[in-house]
Structure formats: structure tokens, C-alpha cells
Image: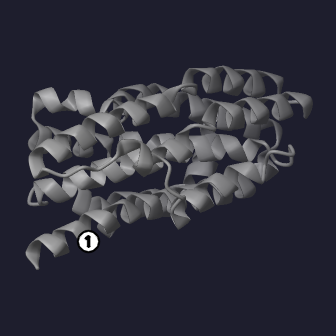
Amino acid sequence: MEREMIEAYEARVASVREYLKNCEVTRRLCDPELDPDVFLRWLIEFASYGVQNTRPVERWMTSAGDHMIAQGFEEVGATFKSHGKHEGGHDEMMVADTHRLVARWNARHGDNLDPEALIGRAPTPGVRRYVELHEDLAAGEGPWRNLAIAREIEGVATAIGPRIVEQCRRVLGDEGLADVTFIVDHVELDVGHTAQDDRLIARLLEQRPELVDEMAERGEAALRAYVDFLGECFVEADEWAARRAA
């Protein structure tokens, strides 16, 4: 029964997962011919804007877990809350990565980028939409949809993360992987997290199979917003490259 339930969910998100693997943003990120400086600037944008995606995660997951417990999904909710505690502080990894990557950029280009100014910028449309998809669940309506969001976003690391790490190694060298701790750590951690998410989704759907569509819809919306965010991180990098070429 558990396998049947997760397969029902996976069938509904199969197309967006395939989109992630094959979209233009992913192809560009993983292109071995990508300009190293453009990729470095992409990494800076990803880390600095990503703080806004990451800082509220523990709160989102704790709230969703509490609401699931209150609505009768005790085991799923408690496990999801525990997972959320492990996500706490991951925004600080992105802050630290931003500082290290900016120092690398400034040393390479004689520039004076300010990491804290980058972190403090207004959100991009993709970041704003991603945050809103979580925040509109804060009142407790449909908290299981947060579980679907977590599954699809953690699935980014398992689906394309290893190729991005290889790109980091190509551009930064093995020692430079210490500058992208968020990416490297999540490629390792999220293998286990996605497996746990699948089990929780299956157990929840065993109790309420009619929730599969709304869960899949929210997971797909979050993944599309996140892909948009990944693409937005190229904007400043491309503008810098255009200025260099002028």
C-alpha cells in the first residue's frame, strides 16, 4: 500500500521533475563550457539570495508539523517537525558561503562587492513566490502541502546536485568546495531526506488518498518557483559578462 501511494504522488509530479532535469537553466548550470566567472557570479547570487529561501525553513516545517499533528497525522507531523529542527541554521551556511565567494570574486577581479549588501537585497520574483507558497499555509490549512514542497525542493539536490558539485570542482578546484558548503552538504544530506519525505507522503496518503492532487500541485508550484530562482541567479552574472565584453 505504501508503495502504491508514493507511486500515485510521483505520477503527478513526474513531468515537473523531468522539467527540472532538462530545462535550459539546468543545462546551462551543468555545461562544462560555462564561463568560470559567470558560474562564480551565479554561485554568489545563489548563496546571497538563497538566505531568504532558507532562513524560515525550520519555522515553516515546525508549524506544518504541529498542524498535521492537530489534524490527526501524529506520526507524520512529529517526524516532519524533527526534520525541521535539522534544517535550522542552514541559512548561516549560505551567509558564510556568500562571504567566501565574494572574497574570491573581489580578489580575482579587483572588485569591492559587499556580501552583506548582497544578502540584504529585495527578493527576486522567484524567491518571493517560493516564500509565499509556504507562508500562505501558516494558518494551518492543508499543512501536508508543506511536506510536498519539502520533497520536491530536497529532490533538486539529488536530481542535479552532483552535476553542480562537479561544476564547482571544475571552477573552484577541490579546495574551493569549502566555499560552497550549502550545495555540497545538501547533495549528501538530501538523499536521506528525500527517502524520508517519500515515506511520510505515503503514510499520509494511506490515511487520506484524496489529498494527492493538492499535494502534487503545491510541490510542482514550489519546484517551478525554485527553477525560476535558479535562472534569476544568472541575471547579474550575464550583465557582468556583457559589461566585460563591451
Label 1's element? helix
In this view, the residue in front, 43 or 207, is 43
Quadrant assignment, res 71: top right
- x, y percent for residue 41: 25, 54
Image side of residue 24 versus residue 48, left or right = left
In this view, the residue in front, 221 or 12, is 221
Image side of residue 93 versus residue 237, left or right = right
Q: Amino acid at mark 1?
A: Glu
| 208 up-or-down from 100: above or below | below
Residue beneath disc 1: 239
Quadrant containing the C terminus in the rendered view: bottom left
Q: Tell me, yes or no, if residue 120 can be seen here.
A: yes
Total labels: the figure holds: 1
- x, y percent for residue 86: 56, 21
In this view, the residue in front, 75 or 160, is 160
Quadrant assignment, res 57: top right
In this view, the residue in front, 38 or 137, is 38
Q: Residues within 10 Å of mark 1 (few under 14, many from 20)?
A: few
Q: How is the image coloured?
A: one colour
Quadrant assignment, res 179: top left
Q: Residue at x 79, y 42 (%)?
A: 143
Q: Residue at x 69, y 43 (%)?
A: 146
| 140 up-or-down from 61: above or below | below
Q: Residue at x 49, y 42 (%)?
A: 51
Q: Tell me, yes or no, if residue 167 can be seen here.
A: no
Quadrant containing the N terminus in the rendered view: top right
- x, y percent for residue 245: 9, 75
- x, y percent for residue 125: 54, 66
Q: Residue at x 61, y 61 (%)?
A: 129
Image side of residue 24 versus residue 129, left or right = left
